[in-house]
Image (cartoon, coloured by chain):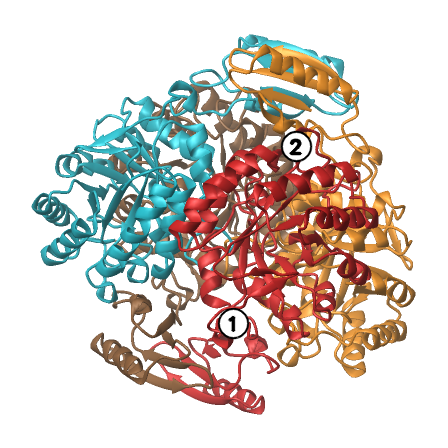
Chain colours: A cyan, B brown, C orange, D red
Amino acid sequence: MIVVMKAHAAEAEIEAVVRMVEELEYRAHVIRGVERTVVACVGEERGEAHSLQHLESVPGVERVMPVLRSFKLASREVRPEGSIIDVAGILIGGRRLVVMAGPCAIESAQQIEAAAVAVKHGGANLLRGGAYKPRTSPYSFQGMEDQGLYLLEDAGRKVGLPVVTEIMDTQDVDLVAEHADMLQVGARNSQNFSLLRRLGKIRKPILLKRGMSTRVDEFLMAAEYILSEGNPNVVLCERGIRTFETATRNTLDLNAVPLLKEWTHLPVIVDPSHGTGIWSLVKPMALAAVAAGADGLLIEVHPNPASALSDGPQQLKPESFEELMSALRPVSEAVGRSL
Amino acid sequence: MIVVMKAHAAEAEIEAVVRMVEELEYRAHVIRGVERTVVACVGEERGEAHSLQHLESVPGVERVMPVLRSFKLASREVRPEGSIIDVAGILIGGRRLVVMAGPCAIESAQQIEAAAVAVKHGGANLLRGGAYKPRTSPYSFQGMEDQGLYLLEDAGRKVGLPVVTEIMDTQDVDLVAEHADMLQVGARNSQNFSLLRRLGKIRKPILLKRGMSTRVDEFLMAAEYILSEGNPNVVLCERGIRTFETATRNTLDLNAVPLLKEWTHLPVIVDPSHGTGIWSLVKPMALAAVAAGADGLLIEVHPNPASALSDGPQQLKPESFEELMSALRPVSEAVGRSL
Amino acid sequence: MIVVMKAHAAEAEIEAVVRMVEELEYRAHVIRGVERTVVACVGEERGEAHSLQHLESVPGVERVMPVLRSFKLASREVRPEGSIIDVAGILIGGRRLVVMAGPCAIESAQQIEAAAVAVKHGGANLLRGGAYKPRTSPYSFQGMEDQGLYLLEDAGRKVGLPVVTEIMDTQDVDLVAEHADMLQVGARNSQNFSLLRRLGKIRKPILLKRGMSTRVDEFLMAAEYILSEGNPNVVLCERGIRTFETATRNTLDLNAVPLLKEWTHLPVIVDPSHGTGIWSLVKPMALAAVAAGADGLLIEVHPNPASALSDGPQQLKPESFEELMSALRPVSEAVGRSL
Amino acid sequence: MIVVMKAHAAEAEIEAVVRMVEELEYRAHVIRGVERTVVACVGEERGEAHSLQHLESVPGVERVMPVLRSFKLASREVRPEGSIIDVAGILIGGRRLVVMAGPCAIESAQQIEAAAVAVKHGGANLLRGGAYKPRTSPYSFQGMEDQGLYLLEDAGRKVGLPVVTEIMDTQDVDLVAEHADMLQVGARNSQNFSLLRRLGKIRKPILLKRGMSTRVDEFLMAAEYILSEGNPNVVLCERGIRTFETATRNTLDLNAVPLLKEWTHLPVIVDPSHGTGIWSLVKPMALAAVAAGADGLLIEVHPNPASALSDGPQQLKPESFEELMSALRPVSEAVGRSL
């Protein structure tokens, strides 16, 4: 941590800062520059240590700049070789790409089964589907809830695919963990720390989506909540961030993919369906995600998007999904991966 | 809802859209323009009605534009005179401004009591303090939890101020509602729909903060979740949005204040502490908020910010809070309000 | 400047960095922390000195963090008492607020004269009007150009108000400087460095608008371009930034007002017309700007907004402008200013 | 254009709107909905026609929604097969990808020649280099200006590559057009309409970069400025937008690539150097750009990035550029393109 003093900080103010830093069990190095004095603080800056950020309110201090990024267990430094997460036998993070596909929301037994057959046939490795739906409007379809969860489990079993579904409430964790192979935390709950901590106490793999306005370092701190409670099975998902651009639903931040691969050992997948909000952009952006180094994809596929109860415009028809998978094969190979 | 057809949409595609619109019980008006045909759909567009947005995935459709904003119970149209919310006898939304003040986090009995005495003395109407703290890092101080809640209640009682505190988990709603006079939903939970729905089932007033990347219409839809479950006691709080600007912690969006006053009947208060993240900007932005039409303020005050366990840089000392309140009086009167 | 080395930087890499730093005539202090080694560089960091930022591409370096903000002549440190800029006898930056008002675009002699009479009557101190208009579409009205400039000058002279107008092209600088009392740089040209440098070579006051996505430090660097060429007469104008919010045309960043007043000695005014894009929000945001510490306002006023050739929705009618000025008086006094 | 009336608009207000619409030579269709009346206006909405947006300031009007996107000559509707732009024999927009590479700034004859040899050897099709540099700070290296331009021309001639360089000032257009094969408009000038119009009057190809906060529709309107003045040779370049994310210099918006390919016939290339600001992310994002459908790349390559006078951290060494080109070949083929 570097404490930058104000231009005309008094000697007594500098000494007071040094004393406070040392009381917090850091060593303080005072460096007197041409226009500013800085106090470099040496000590454990991450993890349980006391933050020095509050020194910003001490007289004479201009600002406090952290030297280290604050995530720790999620850092690639602790596992340079990268993590591989096992979801009911499907390995995420290895050479082979993993494709999770299915409808935005589970609407009926018939619909989820048709979707399951379609995505299995197209080559998906996991079946996705929402039972509990976070909708902007309370008047929109809120999902089939528990009933949807059972239908998803059944549909997955029938076609032989593990299933992943969103969890929205700490109270539902046990139930969902019993019936799903992987629990997804949606963008709106990516900093719902009560939920993250609760998910750290189970062992089922977690698919953690980036929040709409979550910086990459904060995204890793959200993962750190789960990891620090004891659950090492976290897969990250870039799904687009909110920007000034309105032509697409979100701005898919593919920069985050290679950056995350540098910073963390956790696998990274990409959701081009939410990341664009427009079905015709899903295929090119899926290819781009893989070219950027993603470990897998999350794709919305609906047997009949025009009748979908949620997010119709961004869901692929089964035939478009097959087309996407065909296009994906050569791109995967071009970057040394397989499907 | 207006459905815009593509440039060269076939007649059969237009007819198919009309049929789908009518099946959803809207009337369809086809208007043939020079370059585009549009289908105007007449019917109940808000509330429980079926959304037409999914028509965007129908062949020949370019896009679907809603005519109405989607909030309903929160709309000023339903209560042109504005709502006044009663928090244990303190009225929010009337001529008199309401100031809620206190520390970011409750750290000890001594600290919260010192804060309570200071803010009461300074002229605050409610005491605020965090017992459950949503912190970006799992290694940061997470709040005193239940114990903090009891200390807050005691401190408020001693100085005669109602208390407001943040609620993070559906499981804590009953406990917090028993010990606090108002429950705050933080920015990170502003689209935690499980929590919002649960809060709609109690009658205690809710202080709903805007999310970091929540548009004004989405903010009102979050309020709509609470209102539609039966709790009419919602106060909105603008606390800054996330933008590209990094010199301040957030960008306080005061535009939202007069805009919300036009769109909704709910009271609107402003939090310049989070909205700036810098204690020296709190006073000018508090004055600006009131000049823009806010019904009140939420101000972080700590007996000793330099030792604070959370958000030290943005908390005011008691003497700065008094200075703020003194400066606030003439500005309030200048805009026809009182303190 | 602080150079942060990577976690496992080799000793030779650290030594290489020290050598490079010293070759650039800085002194290097090596501080060995628990997890990282940092090299603190002491020397003149601003102005003509060589930047050290490119050390980020040197092997073993993780990142380079500047200690100082990079503006120099614009810094309040060089003129703690604040600058007062004289525009044809009107002083900007003193106790008295300055209001610049007039139409977005000059449309005819009749229109600009009617506007001039109206804003003079309402109490404005300068007349504004656009002769050269930066319009998003090449098919929109592009302004009356030179002809508009002369009409503006005449209208100002008739009512006894100095005039301010936008300059878009280096080739027009001499002409505009001859006919206007103040030259405005619009948001889209706020980082048109050729234009800024050219304006640094004249002595007429410059009204520099913040760009739509310009951070506060970059805004001051834009001012620094003008100052460093020799023109000290710069007034800054906050006019809203671009964010994800679409309910308003821009997000007026009033945080920037008190922040700029801390960082720079240059006067700061606010444009709530562009900052909101909605006429009914102009008055409350004008009051808020003054409460936040602005030295003046830029307000769009049109004799008949419904027929305006540009930006109709955000322009005030003369009677609304008078109402704004009446409301402004008590707020100005409440914050120790006069109108 | 759709005019939405307020909830309780009077009959006289509706009639007044209809009259105004008809005076502007549109036909007006009045549609009376359950909660709102809308007036659909039929007529030529784009190009030279009069905008109806100012109706927003007419009494009783809630808002005005355009039906059509406002670009016209840039629209794919006018040239469904796509444009191919010829830059001194290099075709941009065809099956073959085009790679433009070279240093951020021209620093000396030796440096630009070394760069030219390196990028030619690596397989680039055009040589890029900045002679006039838009730098945030007036104290940073501003480019070698005219001298740099001649050095670039020479270096290109020696290795047999056409050259592209940035133009910042209308006054330099003739000189730059004489010595360069393609003129680049930088992000900060992407809405410098004086410059765009001037570039519409020459025939040399223009490389138009997207502004940091320019929406896709505004980007196409900037192109429209050039096209509407008569120069059809425009290539678009996505180079990252400004968002809240600070881990990367910009957020490369690859969504814009397939979206632009749908909306416009103009070729689209991508600049992953500025789009990320971090050299190690350039290769994965270059591959992603091509997978997303880009027609080419703009890559910063410097013989010795650690000594670069500008943007060192994001420039590739010659060997990294060769590695990128090798990796690019199989990805290009996987998406049906060649290098």
Image quadrant in which you'd find residue B18: bottom left
Q: Nearer the viewer, residue A282 or D27?
A: A282
Residue depicted at 54% across the width and 31% down the height: B301
Q: Chain ID for label 1? A: D
Q: Position of residue D220 (x, y in %)?
A: 57, 65
The disc labelled 1 sits on which kind of residue? Ser
Q: Is residue B102 left or right of residue A328?
A: right
Look at the numbered disc 2 and give the secondary structure of its residue.
helix
Above-or-below relation of A47 to B286: above
Residue depicted at 45% across the width and 83% down the height: D39
Q: CA distance from mark 1 to mark 2?
A: 40 Å
Marks 1 and 2 in Cβ contact (< 8 Å): no
Residue depicted at 46% across the width and 45% down the height: D329
Q: Position of residue C88 (x, y in %)?
A: 91, 60
Q: Position of residue D61 (x, y in %)?
A: 50, 77
Above-or-below relation of C25 to A145: above
The disc labelled 2 sits on which kind of residue? Pro
Q: Nearer the viewer, residue A83 or B187?
A: A83
Q: Position of residue A18 (x, y in %)?
A: 64, 11
- Residue tagged 2: D305
Label 1 Cα neighbours within 10 Å, binned few <14 / some 14-19 / many ≥20:
many
Q: Is residue C313 left or right of residue C322?
A: left
- Residue tagged 1: D75
Above-or-below relation of A60 to D207: above
State which tag comes first along the sequence, 1 or 2: 1
Q: Is residue B208 visible?
A: no
